[in-house]
Image: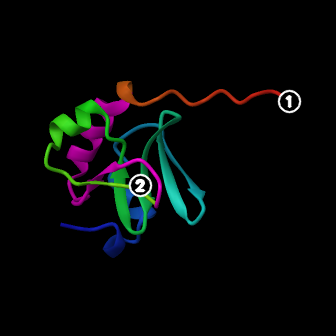
């Protein structure tokens, strides 16, 4: 098992997700948001890889711990083993339809 901390964080997670098209990331307050086809899908926070706790993820990983990415945030599913590239690719494909659409920016 490889943790995010022992494999250089975001770069390692993105490498494991290289089989998934349209993955991007953005640094925010020292942590990273992972986007899948412009929808927020995951975070890399405090050397942890966390995905949105949508129904399909909870069904596939029923025993995975739920933890907040930061104090006061909603819980997310902790992915403890990021070594299985095929599993991560499948997980992102399955969860996509349940991810929230990005909020429209208001015009000033």
Taking the magenta stretch, the answer to whether it contains residue 95 is yes
Q: SS class of the residue under badge 1?
A: loop
Q: SS class of the residue under badge 2?
A: helix
Magenta-colored span: 71-96
The quadrant in which residue 93 appears is top left
The quadrant in which residue 69 appears is bottom left
Q: Which label's residue is closer to the chain start, 1 or 2?
A: 2
Give 39 or 13, whichever is nearer the viewer: 39
- Whole-angstrom CA distance, mark 1 to mark 2, is 35 Å
Taking the magenta stretch, the answer to whether it contains residue 72 is yes
Does 10 sit left or right of 82 as displayed?
right
Give 44 or 9, whichever is nearer the viewer: 44
Q: Position of residue 4 (x, y in %)?
A: 34, 66
**Residue tagged by mark 2?**
14
Residue found at x 60% / y 29% = 103
**Residue tagged by mark 1?**
108
Give 50 or 86, whichever is nearer the viewer: 50
Residue found at x 22% / y 45% = 86
Asked if 23 appears above or below 64 in the picture, the reply is: above
The quadrant in which residue 53 appears is top left
Say few, some or many: other residues with alpha carbon within 10 Å of mark 2 (under 14 / 14 to 19 / 20 or more): some
Asked if 86 appears above or below 83 in the picture, the reply is: above
Give 19 or 92, whichever is nearer the viewer: 92
């Amino acid at each position: 098992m490889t943790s995010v901390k022992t494999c250089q964080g975001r770069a390692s997670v993105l490498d494991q997700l290289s089989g998934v098209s349209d993955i991007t990331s953005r640094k925010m307050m020292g942590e990273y948001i992972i986007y899948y086809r412009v929808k927020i899908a995951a975070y890399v926070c405090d050397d942890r890889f966390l995905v949105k706790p949508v129904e399909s993820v909870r069904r596939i990983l029923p025993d995975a711990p739920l933890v907040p990415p930061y104090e006061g945030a909603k819980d997310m599913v902790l992915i403890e083993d990021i070594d299985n590239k095929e599993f991560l690719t499948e997980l992102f494909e399955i969860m996509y339809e349940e991810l929230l659409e990005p909020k429209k920016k208001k015009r000033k």
